[in-house]
Image (cartoon, rainbow, N blue to C red):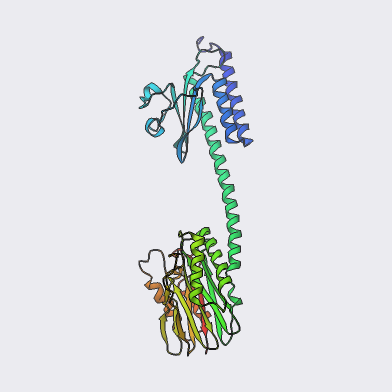
Amino acid sequence: MAATLKNPNKRLDFCNFKLDTLLEITKMINENLPTEELIAKYEKLLLQKLSIGKLLIFGFDKTWNLILKSGFKADEIIELDVENDLLSIEEITTVTAANLKRKTSLDTIIPVFHNNKQAAFVLIGDIEEEREGVSPTIKHLHFIQTLTYLIIVAIENQKMVQQSILQEAFKRELQVASRMQEMLIPDSYTFPRNQKAYIDAFYQPHFDVGGDYYDFFSLNDHEYAFCMSDVSGKGISAALLMSNFQANLKALFTDQISLETLVQKLNEKVMSSANGEKFITLFIGKYNTQTHVLSYVNAGHNPPYFYDITKQELSFLTVGCQGMGMLDFLPSVHVGQINIENQVKLLLYTDGLIEQEGEETTETGMNAVADCLKNNERIDHNIQTIIETLNLGKENTVFFDDISMLGMQFCV
């Protein structure tokens, strides 16, 4: 009994020290101090108040890193490797018992767990066990383990908060980018809908921003220009490249330039912007309402559907060249021409329309779209039927790319 009550004041002092230390740590965490300050406070507690001479802490953040080294000479090299030397240690262990593969001047290894995984390792050495006051003997190692756990979790929480802030900022920037891109994609209600031409469109990006672009606009009183394009890849980089491409196309496409020259110049612009890292497939054309001639270039794009309503014939427009940005210079650009004699429908689209996740070929999607076009209904009704038949919508997860359609109906 007497042995148990030996030095009761020292026991009380250390209990008070534990409480004060935990309160101090909690206050530091609540004040959201930077990681560097948390580590510095922790180091001071262990070295000054617990009389530890040498201290190492390894923490895990994607990889194992040395986050604190204290009490060592400047030129003293730490040869420990966490994965080879420490990962097998699951409880407080002396260095001698651990039988490390590499030498160390430390005495004790303290593993720290978070979410049932090793999150840190504390290694201490040069302990003054009989110093006046608090003595960090073996019975105090669990307290060191607890302190380290609190610090590691606090640092981890700070990282999660910072990541959350960055993610929220990124989300807002993405929303702004999405709204800006929506302004670049023309509203189908602005397209002509008259006796000469009836135009409709559909656009659904896979992410908030996408790499698809289509347009339809007047070159003069009797000529219309139109295009459909798709950037390789997805996301912000594709959207930025497409925005640049759209600006160049609008600047270059006039009633004075030939389609061949236009496509060559666009290819130069894409090569300059993408540096060969991305390419753009493009279908571009124009229609003359006086001569009824449809001219086009298919630059590596999905062949559009061309349906002659009177003859009930379906064909695909394939004449053209390589995609934009695939070659420094296009060796040849072929221009296709069709003399329109009857009422026809033309559907341009990107490959997201006919490619579904898990499908080995696009034949099913191609046939489904064709079936929706081969009738006497107006092109806007056909597009609506395609949307319903293929169940297009963000809730449909079988589609894994941007989806765009530009439908045109020309009347003679």
Count of marks overlaid on the render: 0
Question: Closest to the observer: 29 or 5?
Answer: 29
**Residue 392 drawn above or below residue 52:** below
Residue plotted at (49% across, 88% down): 343
Q: Is residue 51 placed above or below 207 in the rendered structure?
A: above
Q: Position of residue 382 (x, y in %)?
A: 49, 79
Q: Quadrant of residue 107?
A: top left
Instruction: State left or right for residue 218 relative to residue 81.
Output: right
For the residue pair 397 and 341, the one nearer the viewer reads as 341
Residue 388 placement (x, y as % from top left): 48, 74
In the image, residue 26 sits, relative to residue 381, either above or below, namely above
Q: Residue at x 58, y 48 (%)?
A: 166
**Residue 384 seen:** no
**Rendered image quadrant of residue 326:** bottom left
Query: Picture quarter containing residue 187?
Result: bottom right
Between 133 and 34, the residue placed more toward the observer is 34
* Location of residue 220 in the rendering, given as x and y in whole percent from the top left corner: 60, 81
**Residue 376 screen position, x and y as percent:** 48, 86
Q: Is residue 33 visible?
A: yes
Of all residues, the one furthest to the top in this rendering is: 2
